[in-house]
Image: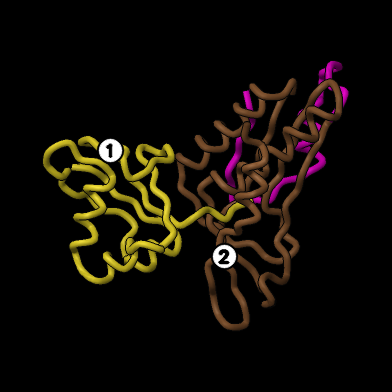
Chain colours: A brown, B yellow
Amino acid sequence: MPIIRVQEADFDTGRELEALTRGRTDVGALASFVGLVRDANDGRAVGGMTLEHYPGMTEAALNDICAQALARWDILEALVIHRVGRLAPGDRIVLVGVTSAHRGEAFQACEFIMDYLKTRAPFWKKETTPAGERWVEARETDDMAANRWKG
Amino acid sequence: MVTLLYFASLRERLGCSREEVALPAGAPTVSVLLDELRNRDARWSEAFAPGQRWRVAVNQQMADLATPVKAGDEIAFFPPVTGG
């Protein structure tokens, strides 16, 4: 069963990853990804952002993405923590953690989960820039990254 | 009745986050519902004009124009997602 959390509060990366392996001796690999708020995007300084989401569907979509990863790769556990609300440059946005017996499966599943999250989970970013607020536009490169897992 | 939800830039553009509307007659789909919304006024027709990028979910599952809608459904419209 994947572990999914959508929250305003920050998370402790070390503690969350530690919890994935605590008490078990079958884990040979733990791959993780942390996404952070950058201080610039599309040529403008970014002073912060607000993350909006679709409560209910967000959790369902993340669960579905992790379930696909669990079905496709020989992995033991998948974790996604995604923050919402007001965030500042340098803040953590998202944590993905995947455990498996061997590293290859964990690396691939972790990247798959992030690529699918970027294109399928209902989150939207609104950035604060010197010219005012603006909604972040979806990137074609994110669609391409997700499409390479098909077939 | 069905519940319509709007998120992010689409919510701001339409000035609406949630509303209840009557289910269109016949065998309605997302496409039929959308035609009714477009007929409201310029704000709605422009937000959903060809070339505008948006997505739709029915009962919290990604859907498309051909997806059927029935009484009690929750139908959400939103821009392409930008999380992560």
Callout 2, which amino acid? Val
* Quadrant of the rendered image containing residue A20: top right
Q: Which residues are magenta?
A: A1-29
- Quarter of the image for residue B47 reads bottom left
Residue B16 to residue A25: above or below: below
Q: In the current view of this chain or complex, which residue is farthest to the left?
A: B25
Residue A136 numbered mark, or none:
2
Query: Is residue B23 rendered to the left or right of residue A53?
Result: left
The residue that appears at 73% across and 57% down in the rendered structure is A36
Q: Image check: B47 left or right of A130?
A: left
Count every numbered label the image shows and give the total. 2
Question: Where does residue A21 sit, x and y in percent of width and height?
Answer: 81, 26
Chain ID of residue with mark 1: B
Secondary structure under tag 1 reads loop
Q: Residues within 10 Å of mark 2 (few under 14, many from 20)?
A: some
Which percent across, then down, holds residue A53? 50, 51
Residue marked by disc 1: B73
Instruction: Identify which residue is drawn at 26% across, 38% down.
Output: B69
Q: Locate the N terminus of chain A by quadrant.
A: top right
Subunit that carries the residue with mark 2: A
User: As shown in the figure, which amino acid type bears the numbered disc 1?
Assistant: Asp
Give me the residue at 61% from left, 44% from top.
A117
**How far apart, in angstroms, are the residues tagged by discs 1 and 2?**
29 Å
Residue A118 image offset from top left, x and y in percent: 61, 48
Drawn side of residue A24 relative to residue A123, left or right: right
